[in-house]
Structure formats: C-alpha cells, structure tokens
Amino acid sequence: MEISGAEIIVNTLIDQGVDTIFGYPGGAVLNIYDALYDYEDEIRHIMTSHEQGAAHAADGYARSTGKTGVVLATSGPGATNLVTGIATAFMDSIPMVCLTGNVAQPLIGKDSFQEIYITGITMPITKHNFVVRDVSELANVIREAFRIANTGRKGPVLIDIPKDVTAAKWTYEKRDPVSVKPKPFTDRAAIRTVADVINEAKRPVIYAGGGVTSGNAHMALRALIQKASIPACNTIMGIGILGCEDELSMGMVGMHGRVSTNYAIENADLVLAIGVRFSDRVALNTGHYAPHAKIVHIDIDASEIGKNVAVDYDLVGDVQSILQSLLPHIEAQERRPWVAQINTWRELDYKPADDDNSIRPHQVVRTIAEIAGEQAIIVTDVGQHQMWAAQYCGRTEPRSFLTSGGLGTMGYGYGAAIGAKVANPDRPVVLITGDGSFHMNMNECPTAVSCGLNLITVVMNNKALGMPRQWQHYLYNDRYACSDFIRATDYVKLAEAFGAEGYRCTNIGDFRAAFETASKSAKPVIIECVIDPNEQVLPMIPAGGTIEDLILE
C-alpha cells in the first residue's frame, strides 16, 4: 500500500526505535506534523519554545541515554535556529538526526518564502547531510542517517526534505532498526606493544574523556585502573567514568582541574590518553604537554591522532574493544611510590572555605549532589557555574553530567535538561546555570511547565558574565568591559509567571531548604542563588600556560 512521504518518515522513525522527537511546526513540515497526529500513541512530540531549545533537548536526550536524539524543524529560520544545537552536538560527538523541511522543489533557488540552503550551512558541523529529492529514497535515507550518526565517532546527521516529497506517495516496507556494532580490535602486535609500555611505566597516568562514555567503556577502564594501579583523571566530558573517589581517581584535569592532577601529568613518564582529543583546555601548551612522558593515544577517530599533540603510540578503534584486548596483557602492580607522590601533591589542591552566612558556589553544588543523590542528572550551561559544577558535582556514573564541552554553548542547559528529563522521568534532573546563560534559554521554562516536568533550575546570580569578568580580573587589569550583567529580572516572579515555582536565597541554609522543597515539587522550580561577583573559579591555568602559571588566589 502506498502512503505519503510524511507517513514514511514517521513509520521509519518508529522502526528505528524512536519514541520521542523534539521540534516546532511550520509550513514546510505540516505534512509531517499531520502524520504525527495519527501516531501520537507511538511517538511523543515535545514542542519547545524555540528550535534551538529543541536541538539541545534532542542532544540532552541522547547524552543521557546513549540513544539517537531526533529534532524536527521547518524551513528557513526554523532550520537555521537548529545550527547552534547541531554544532554543539558535533563538537561533543553526540548522535542526532535532524529533520528539516524545505520549500517544494519547484520553488527551490527562487528566494521563496522561508527558503534556505540548510545543507550548505550545516555541512561543516554534521557528519553527513542529505537532501531527499525523491520519495522513493526517503526511508533508506533516514535509516542511513541513523547508521552514520552511530558509526565510528558519533555525531549529528541532517536530512532536508522538500514539502512536495512529504506529500508524494510511495510504498513502505517495515524493516528492523539499524544495528551498529563496533568492530573488534584485531591488531594483536600493537596491543602487546602498548601493554609492554604500560607495564614498564613507573609514573603512568590515564587521561580519559567523552569517548569512554560514547564507547560504553567505563567498566573496562575501571578494570584497567584497578589491575595496574594507574592514577586516572578525566576531562569535563568524562565526568562520571572514573567512579568513586579513591587514591587512583584524580578528578578533572586541565585549565580548572586539580593542582595534583596537573602535577601528575607534568611529571608522568606515560600518559595513556583514552577517548580524548587533547583539547586546548587540557593541553593548554602543546609544546610543553607531559614533557617527560611517552604518550599512548586510544581513540576511534584516526584524524585525532597527532592533531594537537604528538604521540608515541596509537590504537585506533572501538575503545571498549581495545581496553578489553589490553587487559589480559597488563601486569598487576601497586605503584605505591607514584601514588604516594600524587597524595603529597593533593595537599596543594585548592580547598575553598565554607561560609554559612552567604552562598559560596562549591557549597551550592555539594548541597545539590547531597540532596539529589547519585541518581541525579546534573546539566549545566557554560561559564563559571559550569566549572564549579564540574569540580564539585560528585558524579560516579557516566551520562549523569551533561554540558557543552567543545562549543561552550551558553543557552544549552534548559533544553538539554528537558531532553534528559523526558528520557529519564524517574531520575532527578537539576540544571545549574548562571544569570547570563539563563537569560539565553529561560524561554524553555514554559516547555517544562507544559510537559509537567519537575526540573530544578539553580541560577547562580552574580550579576556578571562571570568567566569573562574573571579573565578581565587576572589578565586585563580589572578592566570590566561589558561583563557586568545588570538585569532587573525578578526570578521568583518570572517563575510564577511561567507557571513554575520560584525561590530566592542569600545564604546556604536558605538554599538547602529551598532545594529540599523543590525536590518534592511536581512543578519546575527556579532557585536564585545570590553569588558574590568576585568569586573566582580556582585553580586556573591561563590559556597557553603551564603548571608554572598556576593561579590559586
């Protein structure tokens, strides 16, 4: 039986296991929305306030589950509003399928109403994109998009569909969902070589990141750490992969990483880099990165090998397969002198003081972690609050800390939190944001209200764009050009106007009480925390610096 292209789209998504899509209707996609009307029992549509919020919601859905996020937008501005969300997912290797409508094919190239060349715009920020010209190709293109999004290094794929294709008829054949199985790593000689290097090392450090999460390799990583007694650190994208705090878990590395962790990298004789890309926020000075160490890079993307930092050995492939192949060849060791040295450096770690009469950022994050518990998913926007959250969130499982790591997208948080909560309705979801970032995405609070999502949003309000202001303090002689962020926003009234609940806190006791109340609410909640604008994210190594440039006060 022949059905419309729009129905083919919906049926193919359902066959791929899609139960939720995020989007916003418009003229070029009304055929698709009409088809969704008939399948509302099988596929849920979350209508956001803005297409960028929809893209971030699909991203948060994907990050928190490991599934593929799906977003739908109309042509023209609807499509261009997805761009920042697509770029965010691309930089952090998040699998998404982005569906955009376009004007009917006879109108393409004529500057028609809401016409845009979205495939050209998004070419640099997608793994691949398609324009479907014939309804007969539609189902297979969607299946191929899911395959590409999840093969190798994951990422977003865009499909642009002219309106006449969604109206055209074609036969539909149901098929099983696309199955992407990682290829086993088979280079035994390379495995033995790297294993020998690891076994011979006296001062090894594991530096692990988001690729471990993407590859579902955190248990294999933990087994390697424990067997070989190798101290390990993580990037911001790798929060949760190391598990509980102990002598071998050194926390975050890099610009705002722990002092002891950065000293360990500086003095290591081997850096085992797993699922990372040597970002400039970690390898701040590539000419002086791990100067005494051999470097082994394990990653699924061959283009990352040697891109930012020269390496001595590399294993390219599925991270889980590689680690599982390595484990039998790794000698059990204790490495007590090296661990003892790192413990000595831990005495230098930055330890902010508590203050019961005000609200200090580290206390906010630790209170959230304590009350919300280990099952909570913490989402952030970008800025000082993001770094404080990363430093003190205490996550012990992957996919429990969602943030824009590569692109650094202010405005990411609320949409991503919606996606995470829709995907994980039984888990607490907490958005930690700043007053700057919140003003970029607060329009998504009505989405949470409409969907009945009991999200908790904690706004650290320092009346400043905190990170630019911090850099202006340390690097620009306190010349605070346009970083004071003075808004007259009443967050409590704003929350109430949106249909949510709101609280304002000026000390940590008030915050604890407000957060405990919010945790029991059935509504979205906004909690404003008044923060001193002179609070700094410490420690800090300036961009391009080394451990010698460390700032602690």
Image (cartoon, rainbow, N blue to C red):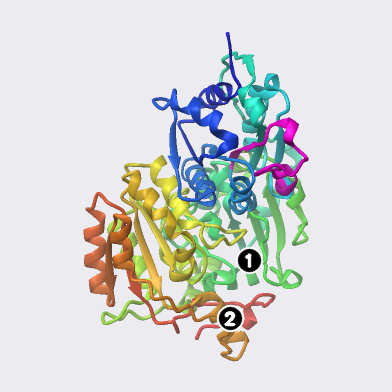
Residue 543, by quadrant, is: bottom right
**In this view, 425 is above or below 536:** above
**In this view, 235 is above or below 241:** below
Element under label 1? loop
The picture places residue 376, in percent across and down from the top left corner, at 36, 52
**Which one is nearer the viewer's eye here, 227 or 244?**
244
**Which one is nearer the viewer's eye here, 101 or 350?**
101
Q: Residues within 10 Å of mark 2 (few under 14, many from 20)?
A: some
Can you tell which of label 2 and label 1 is closer to the viewer? Answer: 2
Instruction: Say left or right for 114 vs 461.
Output: right
**In this view, 13 is above or below 451:** above
* Amino acid type for the residue under numbered disc 1: Val
The picture places residue 149, in percent across and down from the top left corner, at 63, 37
**Which one is nearer the viewer's eye here, 23 or 204?**
23
Q: Which residues are magenta?
A: 95-122
- Residue at the spot 63% in from the left edge and 28% down from the top edge: 142
Confirm or deny contact between disc 2 and disc 1 (CB under 8 A). no
The picture places residue 8, in percent across and down from the top left corner, at 58, 21
Q: Residues within 10 Å of mark 1 (few under 14, many from 20)?
A: many
For disc 1, the marked residue is 282
Q: Is residue 107 magenta?
A: yes
- Identify the mark nearer the N-term, 2 or 1: 1
Element under label 2? helix
* Amino acid type for the residue under numbered disc 2: Trp
- Residue at the spot 64% in from the left edge and 82% down from the top edge: 548
- Residue at the spot 75% in from the left edge and 37% down from the top edge: 108
Is residue 182 at least partly visible in the picture? Answer: no
Residue 471 is tagged as 2
